[in-house]
Image (spheres, grey):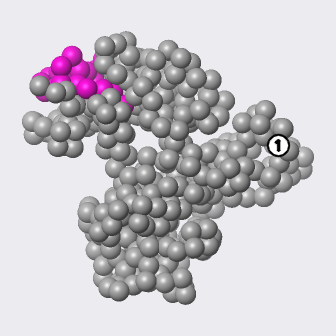
């Protein structure tokens, strides 16, 4: 019997998201989440899809990531899906930052783990938790390949002149200052799924992907290869997000420090956690912003207008970058579910060949679908992202290929 199961782990600072997939038919066997790790109010939510046993929940303290993964292993074992199964082919780990060293999924050994740890200064909020998850999983199943799939990898194909910032070259080289991009597994999956939706191969189409969640990013994908993306050295650059500012004049930072008397940490917190939609109107949930705007709330209306304006700028810019666009595709929580966002982002861009079918745009579906009129010069699509499946597929292909 060929092992075909892949456990996908996404370890955050106080959480672990997981899915167990069978890559023989790309089916999900179990999904779950451990949250508030290290607190008295920890919670494990587990759903065994393979057995149809229904969701289960555990409440109570889970001390650390090791205890969390052991609890996950116990839940899986209770469903006959234990991590000691010979059917487990690999564990795939989401790792946020791969720097310039990691541009493809990579089997983790001691040297690779040390290099991922060395990248912590580039992703201080994410890579430490990713490392912890890897260490615990390796201890639980040292005989099973552990694979790192990097958020930055899909964007590593950006040309050097696109990735570099226009600052002193020696300073940039010394401190690894360049544009890396993030959400790469989502952009990779969605760009390929969009090609399938159009009945073409990825290398035949040029796609603008708009990944719109609480974090948001855009990418320009030419023939299946990323040539530009909106996030940069960190996930702060680019589109307006739930709590992040996106693009701004860097001198804003100097102004806040010199005139506002704010510390570096205070400015960091402001731009990453207290800006974006939240900073402009007090809500980072697009559903609430839309509700308030619809009721005439001026702050919500302006926040929505700023959000959409930035989207339009990137659609236009990436149209110029690609030269020819076959599809603009919306994905992630806001992109998949907020029809008014899609409508507003495309409105007025008829000169670029973009238009929506209002009825198709208003329909709700979990399936990839076109929302542009028949015969439109540029397709507009909604494609649900599936980062876990993408991680599992890259992991499985690496260990079996």
Residue 295 in sight from this viewpoint: no
Q: Is residue 120 left or right of residue 207?
A: right
Q: Could you tell me which residue is drawn at 77 percent across and 37 percent down? A: 173
x then y, percent, for residue 244: 61, 52
| Quadrant that contains the C terminus | top left
Q: Is residue 279 left or right of residue 56?
A: right
| Count of marks overlaid on the render | 1
Q: Could you tell me which residue is drawn at 45 percent across and 70 percent down? A: 328
x then y, percent, for residue 254: 85, 48
The foreground one among 2 and 378 is: 2
Residue 163 is covered by the magenta coloring: no
Q: Could you tell me which residue is drawn at 54 percent across and 34 percent down? A: 102
x then y, percent, for residue 84: 21, 16
| Quadrant that contains the N terminus | top left
* Res 137 → quadrant: top left
Relative to 102, residue 110 above or below = above
Magenta residues span: 70-92
Relative to 355, residue 60 above or below = above
x then y, percent, for residue 49: 16, 40
Which type of secondary structure does the marked residue at label 1 adopt?
helix
The residue under label 1 is 169
Q: Is residue 134 left or right of residue 242?
A: left
The foreground one among 175 and 74 is: 175
Q: Could you tell me which residue is drawn at 84 percent across and 54 percent down? A: 251
The foreground one among 44 and 211 is: 211
Residue 131 in sight from this viewpoint: yes
């Amino acid at each position: 019997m060929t092992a075909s199961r892949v456990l996908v782990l996404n370890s955050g600072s106080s959480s672990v998201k997981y899915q167990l997939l069978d890559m023989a038919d790309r089916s999900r066997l179990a999904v779950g989440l451990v949250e508030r790790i290290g607190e008295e109010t920890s919670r494990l939510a587990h759903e065994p899809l393979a057995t149809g046993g229904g969701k289960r929940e555990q409440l109570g303290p889970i001390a650390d990531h090791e205890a969390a993964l052991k609890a996950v292993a116990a839940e899986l074992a209770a469903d006959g899906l234990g991590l000691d199964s010979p059917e487990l082919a690999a564990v795939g780990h989401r790792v946020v930052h791969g720097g310039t060293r990691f541009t493809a999924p990579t089997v983790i050994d001691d040297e690779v783990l040390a290099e991922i740890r060395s990248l912590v200064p580039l992703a201080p909020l994410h890579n430490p938790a990713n490392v912890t998850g890897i260490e615990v999983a390796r201890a639980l199943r040292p005989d099973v390949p552990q694979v790192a799939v990097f958020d930055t990898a899909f964007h590593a194909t950006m040309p050097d002149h696109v990735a570099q910032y226009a600052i002193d070259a020696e300073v940039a080289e010394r401190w690894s200052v360049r544009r890396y991009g993030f959400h790469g597994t989502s952009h990779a999956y969605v760009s390929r799924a969009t090609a399938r939706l159009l009945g073409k191969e990825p290398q035949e189409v040029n796609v603008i992907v708009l990944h719109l969640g609480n974090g948001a990013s855009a990418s320009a994908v030419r023939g299946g290869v990323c040539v530009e993306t909106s996030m940069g050295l960190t996930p702060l650059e680019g589109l307006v997000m739930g709590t992040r500012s996106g693009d701004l004049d860097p001198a804003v930072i100097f102004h806040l420090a010199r005139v506002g008397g704010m510390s570096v940490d205070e400015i960091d917190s402001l731009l990453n956690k207290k800006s974006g939609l939240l900073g402009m109107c007090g809500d980072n949930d697009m559903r609430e912003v839309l509700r308030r705007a619809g009721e005439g709330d001026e702050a919500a209306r302006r926040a929505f207008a700023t959000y959409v304006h930035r989207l339009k700028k990137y659609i236009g810019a990436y149209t110029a970058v690609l030269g020819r666009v076959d599809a603009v595709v919306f994905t992630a929580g806001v992109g998949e579910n907020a029809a008014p966002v899609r409508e507003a982002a495309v409105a007025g861009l008829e000169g670029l060949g973009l238009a929506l079918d209002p009825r198709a745009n208003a329909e709700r579906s979990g399936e990839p679908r076109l929302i542009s009129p028949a015969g439109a010069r540029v397709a507009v699509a909604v494609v649900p992202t599936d980062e876990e499946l993408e991680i599992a597929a890259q992991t499985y292909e690496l260990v079996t290929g």
